């Protein structure tokens, strides 16, 4: 058996957008002169557009008479579909424009848990107010997993502590804060407004594991070493809220970013420390060379909402 030469060919007529547009406007005006004026063209090109469309349909779409025109039955049948096609195209063009402008789409954001008590709520509110069409997918992650997710393109933006220096990773600091001592509320050192770091030398420490946040972990070790001791590890926890809870349970003490004071847990006290030279930073990070307009708009929101830039 011999296959047909056009087997599998799509036989739907190819309707040119200008022809459909001209047809709809002429159906509204029923006057070639006024329709040509609305289209910004002369009457002969308008007549050619209509004739080409009628040739594709295979039937007249308008009756022409002295001083008046009217839709034929074929024209009446085509008009609703033609209007829907133009409306759907306009909707699609508007959606494409919003997506291209970063005003629509899905943005995946990672954040360190402690930021939920500081800059995260205001930052998300600022961005949602500016771009309500953007769907924000928020994922709670520590620093190291965020960096991995950014590299593997599972996140678009990370809000994290101390991003590593990597050639593929861009970052911008949002805030810098001191460290504070985290103590059980009944601890003898809570009687002091400022706690010497050296006074913690004999205490077991509750710390984040280094793999969860290498830089902030190393800063805490430097604070202890500068005061003449190596911290004795008691327990580990991957989130600052858990660190506070374990301290409150009497399992040790800790040094933590000052924003931990917003975690108001019963049985936990926070005190300034001396020396207090070490600071930790919170940054937003993204892939260097990122072209996504969604990311660009979020960075603008962060600069406006957190850094106060206009």
Image (tube, rainbow, N blue to C red):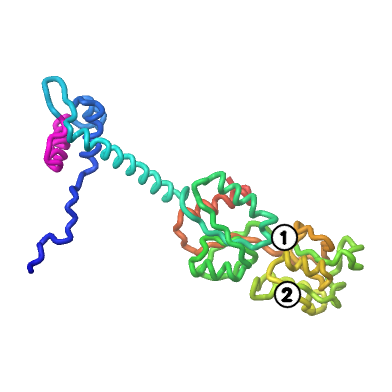
Q: Quadrant of residue 31?
A: top left
Instruction: Return the x and y of residue 189 as percentages of the image width and height.
Output: 89, 67
Instruction: Return the x and y of residue 71 as percentages of the image width and height.
Output: 19, 29
Residue 130: in sight, yes or no? yes
Residue 169 forms part of the magenta stretch? no
**Looking at the image, residue 219 lies above or below residue 23:** below
Residue 48 forms part of the magenta stretch? yes
Which part of the image, by quadrant, shows the N terminus? bottom left
144 vs 86, nearest the viewer? 86
**Looking at the image, residue 9 lies above or below residue 255:** above
- Distance (Cα) linking label 1 and label 2: 22 Å
Q: Is residue 144 left or right of residue 188?
A: left
Q: Residues within 10 Å of mark 1 (few under 14, many from 20)?
A: some
Provide the residue designation for mark 2.
236
Instruction: Return the x and y of residue 239 as percentages of the image width and height.
Output: 69, 67
Q: Is residue 301 left or right of residue 70?
A: right
> At x 82% / y 62%, what residue is drawn?
270
275 vs 87, nearest the viewer? 87
Q: Residue furthest left?
A: 2
Q: Secondary structure at mark 1?
A: strand
Q: Secondary structure at mark 2?
A: strand
Magenta range:
43-62
The numbered mark at residue 15 is none
> At x 67% / y 75%, what residue is drawn?
210
Instruction: Return the x and y of residue 85 as percentages of the image width and height.
Output: 29, 42
Provide the residue designation for mark 1.
177
């Amino acid at each position: 058996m011999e296959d047909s030469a056009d087997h599998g060919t799509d036989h739907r007529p190819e309707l040119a957008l200008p022809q459909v547009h001209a047809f709809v406007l002429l159906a509204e005006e029923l006057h070639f002169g006024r329709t040509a004026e609305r289209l910004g063209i002369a009457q002969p090109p308008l007549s050619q557009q209509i004739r080409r469309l009628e040739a594709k349909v295979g039937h007249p779409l308008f009756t022409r008479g002295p001083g008046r025109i009217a839709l034929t039955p074929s024209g009446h049948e085509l008009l609703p579909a033609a209007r829907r096609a133009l409306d759907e195209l306009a909707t699609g063009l508007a959606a494409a424009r919003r997506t291209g402008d970063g005003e629509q789409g899905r943005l995946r954001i990672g954040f360190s848990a402690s930021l939920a008590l500081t800059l995260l709520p205001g930052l998300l509110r600022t961005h949602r107010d500016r771009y309500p069409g953007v769907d924000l997918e928020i994922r709670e992650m520590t620093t190291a997993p965020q960096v991995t997710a950014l590299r593997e393109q599972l996140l678009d933006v990370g809000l994290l502590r101390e991003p590593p220096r990597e050639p593929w990773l861009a970052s911008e600091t949002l805030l810098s804060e001191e460290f504070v001592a985290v103590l059980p509320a009944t601890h003898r050192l809570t009687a002091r407004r400022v706690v010497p770091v050296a006074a913690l030398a004999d205490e077991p420490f509750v710390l984040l594991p280094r793999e969860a946040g290498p830089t902030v972990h190393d800063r805490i070790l430097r604070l202890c070493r500068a005061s003449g001791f190596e911290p004795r590890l008691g327990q580990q926890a991957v989130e600052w809220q858990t660190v506070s809870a374990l301290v409150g349970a009497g399992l040790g003490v800790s040094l933590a970013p000052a924003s931990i004071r917003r975690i108001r847990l019963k049985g936990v006290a926070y005190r300034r420390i001396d020396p207090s030279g070490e600071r930790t930073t919170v940054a937003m990070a993204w892939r260097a060379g990122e072209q996504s307009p969604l990311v660009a708009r979020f960075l603008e929101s962060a600069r406006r909402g957190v850094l106060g830039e206009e």
